[in-house]
Amino acid sequence: YYLLNPEEWPYDALGIALDPWQKRTINQLFTGPKRRMSVRAGHGTGKSMVAAIITHLFLMNWVPSKVIASGPSGRQTRLQLWAYLNDIWNRSIFKNDIEWQRTKMFVKGEANEENWFCAWVNSKNTKNMEGFHGPLEGKNLLWIIEEAKGVQDAAFEALNGALSHEDNYLYVSSTCGPPRGHFYKSHTTLRNIYDCEHIPSTESSRISREQIETWKLNYNGEDSPIFRARVMAEFPTASDLAFARV
């Protein structure tokens, strides 16, 4: 049932009621023909929470399976995702079936640590992105790329070889950066291979109007490139140099 209706699993297994865009994202990723989802979203919209939810969903329904998560080289990105994964683990009716570690989680059982797990790899060294394949002759593999605007094109090129089998999926999410790189292309020239979601902070039920106004002040007004990028989830039209000076 959940392979056909994956958007229902978070409420049944975790007690989490998803926003409409989160349901669409999960359903399209796992039942759509492209099997690649790119989400550009503003602050506080829940894009990283979706990454944590689909990790648990995948591990519990694709048997056995591997989830490989990555992002920019900064330690903060990994810690943020791992905090969400820990929260979901604590909510899950399958908590006792999963062994939790600081940089890895796996389904309990003999040999599962090597064949049925989620782990983080650093994208800075592209060799870290190579060599991962699903546990069933390449099947049942999910890649998650957090803060994708900061991940180099070479890293995406390295993982492409691991996305050629049945039941291989890619979830990419980020706030927006300068109009270049693979994340930008996933919403422009590569839309033929990606399903996309665009979620401004202003359209999220999780964010108050007061917070939006605070961001306007902090980011020098709603017309500033940084406000458009981080709150409205729009790629700035200003030059990269001007964006960097904001």
Image: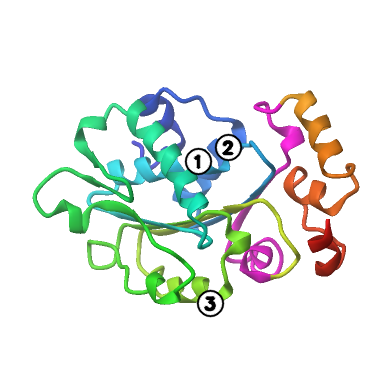
Give the amino acid at mark 3: Ala
Q: From the image, tell me which residue sits under label 3.
A: 154
Crowd band around label 1 with a 10 angstrom C-alpha radius: few (<14), some (14–19), many (20+): many
Q: Looking at the picture, does residue 203 appear above or below residue 118? A: above
Q: Residue at position x 76%, y 51% from top?
A: 229
How far, Cα to Cα, is label 3 from label 1? 25 Å
Question: Which quarter of the picture shows residue 200?
Answer: top right
Instruction: Give the magenta range.
Output: 181-207
Q: Are marks 1 and 2 in contact (CB under 8 Å)?
A: yes
Q: Earlier in the sequence, mark 3 or mark 1?
A: 1
* Viewport quadrant of the C terminus: bottom right
Q: How far apart are the alpha carbons under marks 2 and 3?
A: 27 Å
| Residue 50 numbered mark, or none | 1
Vertical position of residue 54 compared to residue 180: above or below: above
Q: In the depicted view, which residue is nearer to us: 31 or 21?
A: 21
In the image, residue 206 lies in the stretch drawn in magenta: yes
